[in-house]
Amino acid sequence: MMKRFTLLSTVASFAATLALAAPVWADSPLRGGILQVGLADDPPELDPHLSSSNASRTILHNIFATLVEVDDKLQIQPELAERWEVSEDGRQYTFYLRDGVKFHDGTTLDADAVAFNFDRMRDADEFGSARAGELAFVEDVKVDGPLQVTVTLSQPYGGFLPALASWSGMIVSPTAVEEHGRDFGQVLVGAGPFRFVNRIRDDRVVLERFDEYFKDGLPYLDGVVYRPFVDAEARIVNLETGSIHIINTVPGRAVNRLQESEDINLSIVGGLGFRGIWVNVDSDELGSRERRAALSACIDRRVVVNSIFGEAAVPAVGPFSPATWVVDSAEEAPHRDVDAARAALAEAGVPDGFSFPLLITPDDESIRVASIYAAMCSEVGIDIQLQQVEFGTILSRMAEGNYAGAQIELSPRNDPDLSAHPWFHSSGGVNFSHYASPEMDRVLDEARAAVDQGERRALYREALELFNTDFPYVFVYHLQEMKAHRAEMMGYRHIPDSMMRFEDVWLQD
């Protein structure tokens, strides 16, 4: 069997070379079979309007159809909305929905259902929606007809359609929500290609084909089973032996090993997410900007990348990866500066250093990365105390503000606004750093309102300077978007927003 491997450093080059990287297709797709998926974490929450984890999103996108979609170039395409119109002032979006779309419970997905979803997602107070920050500019939602809905924004928002291709576009069944209330996350009724069957925590999430899916003939598979493998080696071994067909996270140290396998296809595209250290700016340990500056200056981003990830990651200059239009691929990340770290500690009044607990997940890669951070920082007296905690517990503690530092992966997003505003605006729905800066708020708000890409880029460059002044997060690297799957898994499209779409996938005998 011919070996297939694709290395793509940017989204644009991915699209250009897709034909070369694609599998050899059989005459026609085969129906049936259960796809086995290996996840790096057990998802903590499965309600699309409450969750923020990457593991959750990659499951939910196959259950919940979105208003719009993205293609291989991250360009917006129709999905539940067949088409839309935007007013001249950029404030009104009128969506025209597909006719005949059914939810998994048999109810109709219409304009009333879409309006219901916007109301639910905008409810940050009573419901506690994690989507409220992304939809903060939504001023009004009006049903104009059975299949027509108009969303009015308080001002133009360049990231609105990209948001509707991800979390904020996942449409849930109003009937199921009204019936189950806060327990909706245990039933998960959407209109996507697969319907939810059951979940056994720390073991599996099971989906089955939805026969009334609105795209004729799809999906091909009978179902999908997601299984968490926190241990990276176990994840790789199960892929190699065929117990699972695809994994959502590829450890950097396994890249060469997978490249050499004739039974596995490995694809690498420019990743959109950021990795490093979450810091709680309200904590005693990291509440001082100078302490955070010292922490950032201690870390050699190039050593972290080269010693653990190799070509599977690139050093970070901020939350925006080189795969976006904000950062140039040749732009250099900050260099390690021990003298600057010592000066910052002296300015903070702790010249001999300080200690803080760093929450990490108990997987090999997370432990190795955090251990490097600890070794580097110990040189100036910063004592990082590693605490291994289950992913969901870390996420809960971060939301509560019950932590000093944390190292976890959250969902990469398909627009710069979605990589910054929800996390670092004072009103952000997932502002786990508890960071509040009037200047950052102004820049991120202006970038949201801008439509011209050049203007948006200039504002995000301004935000970069603030990130590297205030240090609400220590940006260390961008992990390339990597997926590895068995050669017998056909039809998979690797879109670099980290979600895995299985409606076109089929299994070769």
Image (cartoon, rainbow, N blue to C red):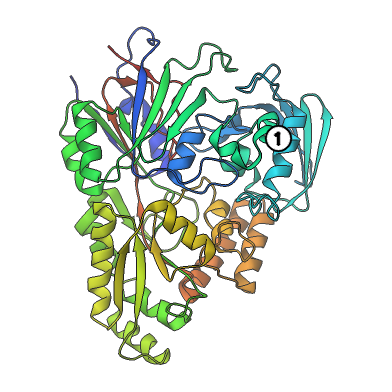
- The amino acid type of the residue labelled 1 equals Glu
Q: Secondary structure at mark 1?
A: helix
Q: Position of residue 329 (x, y in %)?
A: 38, 54
Q: Position of residue 304 (x, y in %)?
A: 26, 62
Determine if residue 178 is in view.
yes
Instruction: Residue 55: name its quadrant.
Output: top left
Q: Position of residue 322 (x, y in %)?
A: 41, 53
Q: Nearer the viewer, residue 396 or 74?
A: 396
Q: Quadrant of the C terminus?
A: top left
**Can see residue 327?**
no
Q: Is residue 210 above or below residue 269?
A: above
Rendered residue at 42%/16% (across/down): 222
Closest to the observer, 465 or 458: 465
Q: In the displayed structure, does residue 438 sit left or right of residue 465?
A: right
Quick check: 14 left or right of 231?
A: right
Quadrant occupied by the N terminus: top left
How many C-alpha atoms fall within 10 Å of the one at disc 1: few (<14), some, or many (≥20)?
Answer: few
Q: Which residue is mark 1?
A: 178
Q: Residue at x 49, y 40 (%)?
A: 57
